[in-house]
Amino acid sequence: MGSASSSYRLIHLDVDGRIQKMVFSRFCSPCDIKELCCTALGVSRNTNLSLLDSSGAMVSIDPNMPHNTERSPYRVVPMTGGGQLADKEELFQNVLTQVAEQFSRAFKINELKTEVTNRLAMLEKRVELEGMKVVEIEKCRKDIKKLREEMASRNNSNFLEDNKKLTPRRDVLSYPKYHLSKETVEALRLPTFDAWQWEPNEMLSCLEHMYHDLGLVKDFNINPITLKRWLLCIHDNYKNNPFHNFRHCFCVTQMMYSMICLCSLQEKFTQVDVLILMTAAVCHDLDHPGFNNTYQINARTELAVRYNDISPLENHHCAVAFQIFSQPDCNIFSNFDPEAFKQIRQGATTLILATDMARHGEILDSFKQKVDQFDYADEEHVTCLKMLLIKCCDISNEVRPMEVAEPWVDCLLEEYFLQSDREKAEGLPVAPFMDREKVTKPTAQIGFIQFVLIPMFETVMKLFPQIEEAMVQPLRDSRDRYEELKQIDDAMNEVQKKKSENLTMAGKKK
C-alpha cells in the first residue's frame, strides 16, 4: 500500500503571468480537472481551454498529465470555438459515470440489466460517431468490457430470477419405474450405501421407496404421482456443482433414512417428525450456487443483502423448497390442514437453517446440556435432537467406506478451489483451508474429522449406542488413515527439501 499522498497530483499553472498550484486526485475525471483549470482562470466551468507547455505544445487534460515544476508551468489558454466536441466529451463522461454509479447498486441487477445494456450500446455508438482518438477509444472499450464482465458476474447470483424451475421439466410418464431388488432395499438402510453406482433416475426411485417404506405416503395420504413430480422438481433445482449437487442431496437423505432405521426413531418420534426429518434432508441444499456463506457476505451478493448476512444460503434453500411446495402439482402436503402445514413448514425450516456450520458449536452445546436427561416428551429436546441428526447426515461422508467417501473429498476441494480462485480474482479474503496452494487432502480432513465429526457423533452415541460400530468407529478409522497419509506426505516433503538444499549448496561451491 502506498502513502495517502501518492494518490494526489500537483500541477503548476501559468494564469495570466501568475503561478498557481492545482492539486487533484489521480482518480479525478478529465472533466473535474478541466473545471479546476477554469476556476483558476476565473471563467465559466463550461469554457473550453487548453494547456500549453513551455514549447507551446498542447498538454492533455487528464489525471496522468506529465508532472511539471514551478519553473515550467503549463499556460492556461481559453479557446474559441470547438466547444461542441468538449461538450460531447463532457456528456459522454457524465453518462459513463451514471452507468458506473447505478451498476454499483448490484443487488438490484435485474432491474438495472436492461438499462445498463442500453446505455452501453449508446456509449459504443457515441465512440464511433465522435471520431475520438485511438487511445481514448481503447480506454472506453476497456471500461465497457469491464462493466459487462461485472454485470455477467453479478448475474450468477440471481439464482431463480431468470429461469425459475418450480415445475419439473419432465412429466411422470417419462419417469422410469425401477423395481428395487431385495439387496438394494436392504443396502439402502445401511450407512455403507454407495451412491456413486446410481444414476439420477435410480436415485429418485430410491427416494420414492424411502417415503413409502417409512409409511409416510400412506399415513399422510400423499398422492404417489405428486410425490414423483415433487422429487423430479427437487432434482431439477439442484445445480451441477462439484459437491453441492443432487447426489449430495440423495446421500444426506439416505443417511437420514439409515439413522431412522438403525436408531429405531419411528418408535421414539411421531410420524410428523419423521416426515420433517426426511423432507428437510431432501431440500436442505436446494439451488446451492457452489459458493458458501462467507463468499456471499464478503461479496455482498443479492442473497446476503436479502437475508441481512444471516445464513443467506440456508434461508435461500428454505425459500426455494416452499416455492416448490406452492405449486399444486408438487405439493405433497396438499391434504394437510393449515395448522398441520404450518407445523411442517416451521419444523423443516428449523432443520435446514441448522445446517449452517456457523451454528455448529451453538447446536452441539445445546444438545450436550440435554442428552444426559433426554426427554422425548419435551418438544425442545426433540427439536434439538432433530437439528443434530440433520447436521450429522449433512457432513456424514466419512462415515461411509473409504472408496465411497474419498471421491467426495475431491469434489469438495474442487468446489473450495473454485471459490478461492474467484475470491482472489475479486480481492476478497480467502480461507486457508480452501486455498489450492495451501491445503492437501490429509490436512483438510484430519482436523475436520477429529474436532467436528467425532465429537458430534460421539455425543449422539450417548443416546444411541448402536451407532458406535456403524458410524463412530469408521470415523476414527478414517482419521487414522489420513494421519498416516499426512506422515507420508511430510516425509516426502522433507526428502524433497533436503534434495533442494543439497543442490543449492553444490551450486554455491561451484
Image (cartoon, helix red, strand yellow):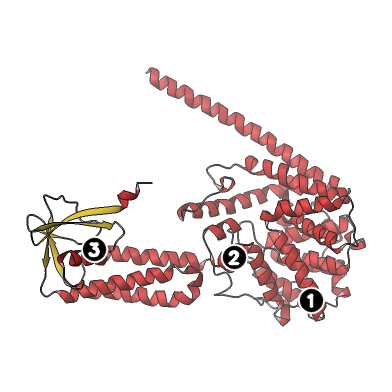
Q: Position of residue 309 (x, y in %)?
A: 59, 62
Q: Quadrant of residue 438?
A: top right
SS for dot 3? helix
Residue 65 image point, x, y percent: 21, 56
Q: What crowding class fits label 3: few (fewer than 14 Cα within 10 Å), some (14-19), or many (20 or more)? A: some
- Measuring from the top left, give residue 153's x and y in whole percent: 48, 64
Q: Is residue 288 above or below residue 506?
A: below
Pointer 3 with pointer 2, Cβ within 8 A: no
Image position of 465 with respect to 152: above or below:
above
| C-alpha span from label 3 to label 1 | 64 Å
* Residue at the spot 76% in from the left edge and 72% down from the top edge: 345
Amino acid carrying mark 2 in the image: Asn
At which x and y percent is residue 220? 86, 75
Residue 308 is tagged as: 2
Q: Mark on residue 341?
A: 1
**Camera-nearest label, 1 or 2:** 2
Q: Which residue is mark 3?
A: 33
Question: Looking at the image, which residue is at 62% across and 75% down?
Answer: 165
**Marked residue nearer the N-terminal end (3 or 2):** 3
Question: What amino acid is at disc 1?
Answer: Phe
Q: Nearer the viewer, mark 3 or mark 1?
A: 3
For marks 1 and 2, give the CA distance.
Answer: 27 Å
Which of the two residues, 288 or 77, is positioned nearer the viewer here?
77
| Residue 422 visible in the current orientation | yes
156 or 345: nearer the viewer:
345
Front-most of residues 183 and 226:
226
| Element assignment for label 1 | helix
Quarter of the image with the C terminus is top left
